[in-house]
Amino acid sequence: MESSLKKLVEISNYYGSDPEYVIAGGGNTSFKNEKHLWIKASGTSMATITESGFVKMDRSALQKISEKTYSEDPLKRESEIKLELHNCIVEDTGLRPSVETSLHNLINSAFVVHTHPTWVNALMCAKNSSEETAKLFGTEALVIEYTDPGYILFKLVEKKITEYVSEFGKDPVIIFLENHGVFVSADTIEEIKSIYRDIDKKIKSKIDFAVPSINPIGSNLTELTESLANSKGLKAKAFNCDLIQHFVKDEDTFKLVGIAFSPDNIVYCKAHYLFSGSDSAKLLQDYESFEKKHGYYPKVIGIKKLGLICLEENEKSLNTVYEVFLDMMKISYATKSFGGPRFMTARQIEFIDNWEVENYRRKIAKT
Ligand SMILES: [Zn+2]
């Protein structure tokens, strides 16, 4: 057992420290035996997690969640589930188990590694995701269409796994989630790595162009960034690179990264981003109408032809905003291979915005 938990920590740190797999508190991992399941706590970072960052859960108690019925009201239902999950904890250390715990329990293999890889999402956040995934992976992978995270997603995955098992007589080792990421499962961490390598290779074989460089270049936005930070009482920082230059060249191109692709994008950057010019009076005006329209300030602003300004309450969150948005730009660019970007819809965004669990994760990530 002890050595399995060490392996779990090892594989979590391995993918957690690679921003092309996981950013900030995103992703989660687990190990299970017959009786128990150790799941990453919500909001903790895979990059630095240790054994004490996992929550030990009772598997038969978890199983009961799928047999019960819950409120029809999504917010009420999610809070009922949160309580149920809490009751499945074997050793309470004050940490909250990941909202995807029940989903991990559905899969029979010992290790489950769920991440949001850039290249997987280039496929999963593209208009032709299902056809292209079928072409690349055949029946090797299960593809789950986008649905609200939490209980609804769990029930859908449960149904799809049952159908897959009855058709193919084995568990799916790869479960792709549209506009979200992937679950990979195996009994050893060596197999997990080999499956991930294979996924990476297959998807990259279809991206026959280079994504512009992300190496930082100068921006000429220092003054504008400082005046914005001062007038809004927020931290602000300017960024620039070839990839940013591609997206800020005009408003239409910026629209290709104008809306969130996944729940995690919303958790860290909110769902919408502002495009404006370098005239500071006009920028302030655009900022205020954005705030009025969406009910929050823009965390990401594309400044025409010049670069990107990110805003947040503190330095750590600001850097995460940039890291997540940089990933979104890579994803958007690479979706060209699979029919172009497919954003989250207004209804899907609303669900995440109202979801307490995600607000909890955002709060943890800030400290
Ligand atoms: Zn996820």
Image (tube, rainbow, N blue to C red):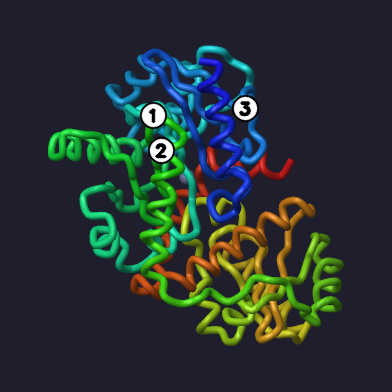
Residue tagged 3:
53
Residue at screen point 50% across, 15% down: 1
Neighbour tally class for label 1: few under 14, some 14-19, many 20 plus, Cα within 10 Å? some
Task: Name, please, the residue furthest toward the left.
Answer: 167
Q: Position of residue 105 (x, y in %)?
A: 37, 27
Residue at screen point 52% across, 71% down: 257
**Label 2 CB less than 8 angstroms from ligand 1:** no
Which badge, 3 or 1, comes first in the chain's sequence? 3
Neighbour tally class for label 3: few under 14, some 14-19, many 20 plus, Cα within 10 Å? many
Q: Position of residue 78 (x, y in %)?
A: 44, 34
Question: Looking at the image, do the residues carrying marks 1 and 2 touch, with CB atoms under 8 Å apart?
Answer: yes
Question: Looking at the image, do the residues carrying marks 3 and 1 touch, with CB atoms under 8 Å apart?
Answer: no
Q: Viewer-proximal residue, 307 or 282?
A: 307
Give the amino acid at mark 2. Answer: Glu
Residue 285 got which mark?
Answer: none
Residue tagged 2:
191
Residue tagged 1:
187
